[in-house]
Image (cartoon, rainbow, N blue to C red):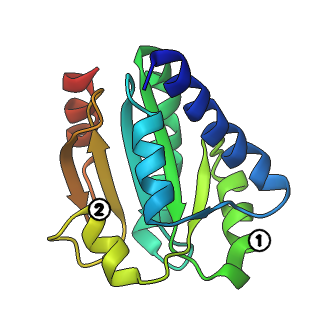
Amino acid sequence: MTRRKSMAALAGFAAAGLTAQTKKLPLMNEAGYTKLLAGAKGKVLLVNFWATWCVPCRQEMPALAKLEAKLKAKGLLLVTISADEPEDDATAQEFLKKAGVTVPSYLKQAANDEKFISSIEGKWSGALPALFLYDKTGKKAQSFIGETDLKVLEAAITKLL
């Protein structure tokens, strides 16, 4: 994929995620996740799986948004994927808005949750919050499952930028 096509694909994902907050969050499945990774090549990508019912997820979201704002110019791209049910879309969007999240955001909608979860990481049970960090080539560099020390996360991201 050429750099121009890669950037165009990434822009399409970003536009879909940002405009979705006025409508519904775009759905994310295995194929969409693969496209997301391909479209982010050249950037350090941090994917945050979260849900509105997950207290640690809600607590870390504003800090993740601030971290993304701080490191965006250096090449960090944060994407959030909600594990909320489709009928809770409005609740998820409202939370994102209140938390100051302006990054591409999606709603997980896989035909088979277990297959989707294991396609992201075989050792991941689906527990939330979950952060997956990818280097500029699209290779997974590190996973953070459960509550994460944001200083440790920032150090891991900085090494890849």
What amino acid is labelled 2 in the image? Answer: Ile
Position of residue 31 measured from the top left corner of the image (x, y, whole percent):
46, 60
Q: Which residue, given by chain and number where applicable, does mark 1 sit on? A: 90
| Residue at (55% x, 74% y) in the render | 109
Q: Which residue, given by chain and number where applicable, does mark 2 sit on? A: 120
Task: Name the residue furthest right.
Answer: 22
Q: Secondary structure at mark 2?
A: helix
Nearest to the observer: residue 152 or residue 13 = 13
Image-based side of 23 in relation to 116, left or right? right
Nearest to the observer: residue 81 or residue 102 = 81
Position of residue 106 measured from the top left corner of the image (x, y, whole percent):
60, 59
| Residue at (40% x, 82% y) in the render | 113
| Residue 116 image-quadrant placement | bottom left
Position of residue 82 measured from the top left corner of the image (x, y, whole percent):
54, 67
| Residue 92 image-quadrant placement | bottom right
For the residues labelled 1 and 2, the Cα–Cα distance comes to: 26 Å
Q: Are marks 1 and 2 in contact (CB under 8 Å)?
A: no
Relative vertical location of residue 140 with respect to residue 154 in this rendering, above or below: below
Tally of marks: 2
Task: Inspect this view and state whether residue 63 appears.
Answer: no
Q: Which class describes the residues within 10 Å of circle 1: few (<14), some (14-19), or many (20+)? A: some
Q: Secondary structure at mark 1?
A: helix
Looking at the rendering, in which quadrant would you find the N terminus?
Answer: top left
| Residue at (32% x, 72% y) in the render | 117
Q: Which dot, 1 or 2, sits closer to the camera?
A: 2
